Amino acid sequence: MKRREFIASAMAMPFLGGCKGLFGPSYQPPRRVKPSEKVNVAIIGCGLIAKGTNVPGFLKDDRCRVTVACDMVKVAPGYFYSTKPKDGAKSDVFEGDIKYGSKVPRDVCGSTIIKNLVDEKYGTRDCREVFDWRDVINDPTIDAVCICTPDHWHAIIAIAAMKAGKHVFCQKPMSLSIAEGKAMARVAKETGVTFQVGNQGRSNVKYIFAEMLALNGYGGRITGGLVSIPGGDHWVGHGRSEARTPLPKWMSPEAWDLWQGPAEHWENNAFIPSIHEPTCWRFNKRYGNGMVTDFGAHEFDEIQRGLGTDVSGPVRVENVKSDLLPDDQRKVFSWAKTFSFDFVYASGIRINVVQINNEKGIPRQTVWHTEKGDIGVKAGKVVVPDELKKFEWKDFKSTDKFIYKPQNDHWHEADFIDGILQERQCCAPCEVGHRTISMAHMANACIQLRIDGIGWDPVKEVFTGPHAAEAMAKCYASEYHNGWELGA
């Protein structure tokens, strides 16, 4: 039978999802796609990152085809990352209002919205909506998945997909804990699937150019560095509210149960808008790890690449400061709104991490301090010392250390398809993503334990020195509830 046919009998194969006792001992071989065929991609999690970034990235690549939009919610409003619409109201658009080809506001997302985007692009009605991600894992027509769910689902879904032989594009932050990341990296290596972490900066030529300069010593010895990321502990419109409400009309009881999945459920299965409405979940530790992981996933990754420590990392976190709430007030808002800390490497290089403060002239940035001046990306622009102002790509030497640059200046999703078709890894492989986000987890461990620093062994991947035992016990691994387990 043709590879693209839906083989009904295959759908009856042993379940490969994430519940206890359902994982078999063996792995399915990685999906292989002939150059003459298209890579079938399923989108799991149909929120704003899928709608605004990943789906458009896949749709402009003729070598793949988005065939499934998976989410437990068909249509949901209120995906606000910064400011609400000028009238201050959410877009009151729901499932019954959506017609094929209709236009909806940017903040309206869900599987029906993604399906309509895909169908409009392809001129068909073929994209399927799926409620449960486990049905995607068991679907023999799917070659690759793009995981855009909240963070508490990333590891379970990614491991299930890899064990089923499917290639994985996993949005950042890659994991909810260091132990999850280690498991994901191990399974990626054992299965041999292509894995791309959604750290878009790794396919950005501005970052690659600056990193090549720093890595190869064009500024002289690196003496330190500076990273600026956003702070905050909630999105607009909520504040630190613990108010419980009935389920919104776009969330069914069945959808709510699946959305929570392995996270501990609240008393009386409560719905708390300030952490359960779209984009708000990242501020509660059951689902996310705050802004340290959310943006550290990007900037710490660039620092690592410029230092040549992609699969290693710092040996200590120091000078940790934060405004973490008292323990009796942290049930809903688990993470600090303001924070700062330093990463220290075995070489002695110290990277300062601070918050963006435009009023004080501190934009988003990743900068290496070198003997000749700063090298990096600041407010979206490459900064270099004066003597490197005229330096161009052609000026790099053949003997320089090379940083992988996506072929033909391909974007992040296209680089993922390159990896699948060429049977290789991409610019943001699983092990690298794990090492990057481990740095954020290290800093968060200090914040959570209210300590000013902790040691780290990047070879054994364990905390060291004072407070190590407490950090290993309380901050190293994730908890799973409701019958779910990691499956690795």
Image: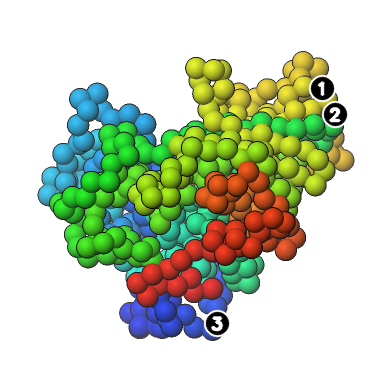
Q: Judge the density around disc 2: few (<14), some (14-19), many (≥20) Cα neighbours within 10 Å.
A: some
Location of the N terminus by quadrant is bottom left
Q: Residue at x 73, y 24 (%)?
A: 374
Q: CA distance from mark 2 to mark 3?
A: 50 Å
Amino acid type at mark 3: Ser
Q: Position of residue 458 (x, y in %)?
A: 72, 56
Q: Earlier in the sequence, mark 2 or mark 3?
A: 3
Q: Of 215 and 5, which appears nearest the observer?
A: 215
Q: Judge the density around disc 3: few (<14), some (14-19), many (≥20) Cα neighbours within 10 Å.
A: few
Q: Position of residue 158 (x, y in %)?
A: 49, 64
Residue bearing the label numbered 1? 372
| Residue 220, numbered circle | 2
Q: Earlier in the sequence, mark 2 or mark 1?
A: 2
Location of the C terminus by quadrant is bottom right
Can residue 96 be seen in this snapshot? yes
Residue bearing the label numbered 3? 26
Q: Secondary structure at mark 2?
A: loop
Q: Where is 419 relative to 443, above or below?
A: below
Amino acid type at mark 2: Gly
Q: Is residue 318 left or right of residue 339?
A: right
